Image: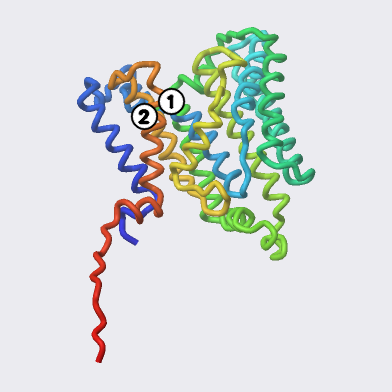
Amino acid sequence: MTFHKHHLFWPFAVFVLLLVLNIFFSNNFFSITVHDGHLYGSLIDIARRAAPLILVGVGMTLVIATGGIDLSVGSVMAVSGALSCLLIGDLGDPDGVAGVLGAIAVALLLCLGLGVWNGFLVSVIGIQPIVATLILMVAGRGLAQLITGGQILNVTSAPYRVIGAGYFLALPVSVLIAVAVAIVAGLLTRRTALGLLLQSVGGSPAASRLAGIQARGLTWLVYVIAAVCAGIAGLIYSSNVASADSNAAGNLIELDAILAVVIGGTALTGGRFSLSGTVLGAVLIETLNVTILSVGIPVEATLLFKAVVVVVLCLGQSPAFRERVLRRRTPVVATKEVAA
């Protein structure tokens, strides 16, 4: 297989093009400075902004690999941030590490329960994934508002602040968390039978059941993983802004996550999936957002510009489009048959 036919070629090509554009429109775009032992720069900012999307995208990839979809990840993010900030605000010592860790654990445990609920509706009750997760998409946002009382909860906890705005070994902690989750997911799906089982369930659920694969359990598992990943992303988001906003947290991130998954080469019909492609897709989306600002695209045209770039990228990835438009056709020479 030639390089240009690789499923990551076009996303990587567009990513490089966006980086080149920023050289002309953004001063010192590739400049990375060290201040107080921390790395700063536009590239670092892109990685930090992409961290929550990478986390949500990893979970979404596994769900889509089974032929499902999860529209509730944004609401789960809001619930996670709301509960953790509420519990930390009630602590007598908000800077106590043990108390903060306990609040984080409770928030993630609730997210796990929400994932169990999604998996139960899809794998046991048999509700269509888009309908089942749409229920939690609406109810989860309402739950987050109930937790916060419809208010923005501010937190002043130094240990909690580390999750979204802290640094470790000069790198943002949020980026390290996202990379660690992506690596663990990659090892589990590539070094064990989990990846093959997910592809089997997504490619043909009936055949996988006949082959003895526990399709119901695997389907349940991926929704739990997606909810936990969204919960971690919610912690990063709320920690970064030092508050819980039940309306803004995770708003429409499920659409960007699905877009990152598709850009990365995962089939929406289930079966084939690529976690590395999803990571690249998430970084590409955030790079595109930064490029739109640096180029000076008017605010009212940003969404249209973003849509055009995505359409061009998807067309470039489409084998049918390349076959019809990009491939040179061999001219057909008409011949006349001469009667003997």
Q: Which mark is residue 49?
A: 1
> Is 112 rendered above or below residue 211?
above
- Residue placed most toward the observer, 224 or 164: 224
The image quarter in which residue 151 lies: top right
Question: What residue do we see at 56% from left, 23% from top?
Answer: 250
> Is 112 rendered above or below residue 103?
below
In the rendered image, which quarter contains the C terminus? bottom left
- Residue placed most toward the observer, 146 or 336: 336
Q: Which mark is residue 24?
A: none
Whole-percent x, y for residue 289 in the image: 38, 25
Question: What residue do we see at 36% from left, 39% from top?
Answer: 312
- Residue placed most toward the observer, 328 or 102: 328
Whole-percent x, y for residue 118 in the image: 71, 37
> Is 322 rendered above or below residue 104?
below
Compared across the picture, whether 287 is left or right of 164 comes to left
Q: How far is disc 2 from disc 1 in space, using C-alphas?
A: 12 Å
Tell me the element at label 1.
helix
Identify the residue position indicated by label 2 in the image: 288
